Image (cartoon, helix red, strand yellow):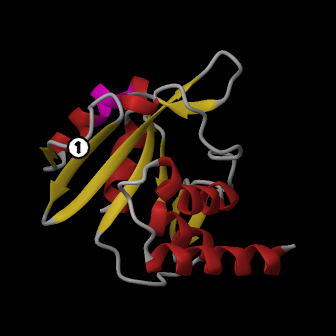
């Protein structure tokens, strides 16, 4: 499904970046755990074309967060979410909508080289930004508890970064 969505988005000029567990796996070059969903970042200006692309691919919209913040879909029982990004006057990547609109995301969010698993290459969130997001999400949004898988993901990413320096 990742390859299908990336291909269709690229054909329409829509940029996407994997985030969450799949971004980590593409950075590491292997699948490290089971995934219940696929998380992405997309630019807010691409929300309408993205929704059309996904609908044509058979994804069904799912109500959830404010639509100017995130778009959620399901296909074949697999949830996909697209957190929308904006940019402030200083060029920083920010939260596009909802209660945190305008809040900057961590530096380096979109600066990583594409990741790869086998022959599939995908744009990913920068691993240092990914670590900060996983560490800070329960602080930024107290309704989201700390999860064991996030601690494990942080440890994997930090080990990989140490090994690459």
The residue positioned farthest toward the right in the image shown = 165
Q: Position of residue 129 (x, y in %)?
A: 65, 54
For the point 63% across and 46% down, the residue is 109
The N terminus: image quadrant: bottom left
Q: Is residue 87 above or below residue 71?
A: above
For the point 28% across and 72% down, the residue is 36
Write down the region rendered in magenta: 46-50
Q: Nearer the viewer, residue 101 or 119?
A: 101
The residue positioned farthest toward the top in the image shown = 89
For the point 55% across and 53% down, the residue is 123
Q: Position of residue 5 (x, y in %)?
A: 33, 52
Q: Position of residue 116 (x, y in %)?
A: 57, 69
Q: Nearer the viewer, residue 28 or 149?
A: 149
The chief SS type of the magenta part is: helix
Q: Is residue 78 visible?
A: yes
Left-right relation of 22 to 38: right
Q: Secondary structure at mark 1?
A: helix
Disc 1 designates what residue?
54
Left-right relation of 9 to 86: left
Quarter of the image where one finds residue 147: bottom left
Left-right relation of 147 to 105: left
Quarter of the image where one finds residue 132: bottom right
For the point 38% across and 59% down, the residue is 144
Q: Is residue 13 visible?
A: no
Task: Verify whether residue 118 appears in magenta.
Answer: no
The C terminus: image quadrant: bottom right
User: Mark 1 packing: few (<14 Cα in 10 Å), some, or many (20+)?
Assistant: some
Left-right relation of 134 to 43: right
Q: Is residue 148 above or below residue 131?
A: below
Q: Is residue 110 above or below residue 125?
A: above
Q: Position of residue 136 (x, y in %)?
A: 57, 56
């Amino acid at each position: 499904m990742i390859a299908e969505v990336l291909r269709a988005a690229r054909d329409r000029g829509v940029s996407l970046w994997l985030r969450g567990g799949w971004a980590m796996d593409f950075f590491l070059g292997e699948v490290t755990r089971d995934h219940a969903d696929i998380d992405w970042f997309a630019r807010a200006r691409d929300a309408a074309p993205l929704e059309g692309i996904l609908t044509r691919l058979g994804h069904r919209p799912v109500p959830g967060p404010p639509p100017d913040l995130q778009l959620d879909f399901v296909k074949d029982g697999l949830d996909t979410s697209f957190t929308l990004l904006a940019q402030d006057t200083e060029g920083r990547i920010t939260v596009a909508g909802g209660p945190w609109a305008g809040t900057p995301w961590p530096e380096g969010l979109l600066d990583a080289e594409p990741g790869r698993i086998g022959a599939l290459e995908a744009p990913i969130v920068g691993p240092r930004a990914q670590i900060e997001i996983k560490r800070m999400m329960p602080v930024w949004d107290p309704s989201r508890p700390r999860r064991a898988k996030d601690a494990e993901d942080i440890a994997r990413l930090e080990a990989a970064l140490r090994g690459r320096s």
